[in-house]
């Protein structure tokens, strides 16, 4: 089955630690995205990638880093520099850039303890 | 912020009634999309309407777009309890790559 997979579903992190969220897609999509969602809020764009080996900062990139070494994979690292990392993180992909249907993973809920 | 805004923030209706949600945005767009999110899950694409279209239907969904007013509406007819979810509009601004999501409307359909 084609789709986009995020792991883990739940993640707990101690303050001061970096943590990496996984996102894999087998849809052969060029574009991939990371969004952050806080309770009762919409989605805010963290990073996006239009093509392998290229990525751009979104609206709230501070304290986050990404890589796009393979077309299928777009991992997000939440660094210790992110002041308020507890949130729901969503990864998405689309055939091309903005304006095409986006397919979302099921999300990773990160909690800092 | 370029973020669109949905209205109302929350909506509670009885099963069988129609639900209407509105979305306003700020600058010219290429197209507008509506997504649905069940609690704690990812978003699911519902419908895309292009800037040169005025109305689009998909099953019980009807979407309208008024580019002169920079607004869109999503109508769900004959709602069901299973329609309970949050609904987001997403805009793709002319000349931009990013898709910008609004804050969403929470719909609760009572059985």
Image: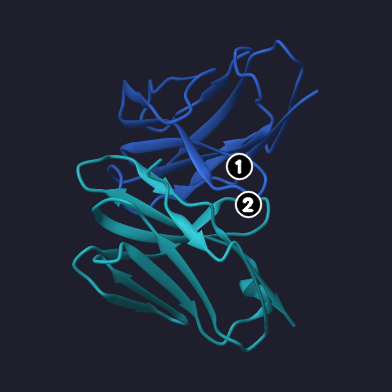
SS class of the residue under badge 2? loop
Report, in whole angstroms, how far the alpha carbon at label 1 lies from the one at label 2: 6 Å
> Badge 1 local density, few (<14 within 10 Å), some, or many (20+)?
many
Q: Is residue B94 left or right of residue A112?
A: left
The colour one sees for chain B in the rendered image is cyan
Mark yes or no: residue A27 visible. no
Reading the image, the residue beneath label 1 is A107
> Badge 2 local density, few (<14 within 10 Å), some, or many (20+)?
some
Quarter-wise, where is residue B96 in the image?
A: top left
Q: Position of residue A10 (x, y in %)?
A: 72, 35
Quarter-wise, where is residue A88 in the image?
A: top right
Mark yes or no: residue B11 visible. yes
Does residue B73 sit above or below A107 in this rendering? below
Q: Position of residue A68 (x, y in %)?
A: 39, 23
Task: Using the image as rendered, state which of residue A40 and residue B76 is in the foreground.
Answer: A40
The colour one sees for chain A in the rendered image is blue
Q: Chain of mark 2?
A: B
Does residue B38 sit above or below B16 in this rendering? above
Reading the image, the residue beneath label 2 is B41
SS class of the residue under badge 1? loop
Outermost residue on the right side: it is A113
Query: Dots 1 and 2: beta carbons under 8 Å?
Result: yes
Q: Are dots 1 and 2 on a single chain?
A: no
Residue ID at (40%, 50%) = A102
Q: How is the image coloured?
A: by chain
Q: Position of residue B76 (x, y in %)?
A: 51, 79
Q: Is residue B109 left or right of residue A6?
A: right
């Amino acid at each position: 089955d084609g789709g986009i997979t995020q792991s883990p579903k739940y993640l707990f992190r101690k303050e001061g630690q970096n943590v990496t969220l996984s996102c894999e897609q087998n849809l052969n999509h060029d574009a991939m995205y990371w969004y952050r969602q806080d309770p009762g809020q919409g989605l805010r764009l963290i990073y996006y990638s239009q093509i392998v080996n290229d990525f751009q900062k979104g609206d709230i990139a501070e304290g986050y880093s990404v890589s796009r070494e393979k077309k299928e994979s777009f991992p997000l690292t939440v660094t210790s520099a992110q002041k308020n990392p507890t949130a729901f993180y969503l990864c998405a992909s689309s055939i091309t850039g903005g304006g095409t249907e986006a397919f979302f993973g099921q999300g990773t809920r990160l909690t800092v303890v | 912020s370029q973020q669109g805004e949905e209205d109302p923030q929350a909506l509670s209706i009885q099963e069988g009634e129609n639900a209407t949600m509105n979305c306003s945005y700020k600058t010219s767009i290429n197209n507008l999309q509506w997504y649905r999110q069940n609690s704690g899950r990812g978003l699911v694409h519902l419908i895309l309407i292009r800037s040169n279209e005025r109305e689009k239907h998909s099953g019980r969904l009807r979407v309208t777009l008024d580019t002169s007013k920079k607004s869109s509406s999503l109508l769900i007819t004959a709602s069901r309890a299973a329609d309970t979810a949050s609904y987001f509009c997403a805009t793709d601004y002319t000349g931009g790559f990013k898709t910008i999501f609004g804050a969403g409307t929470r719909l609760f359909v009572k059985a």
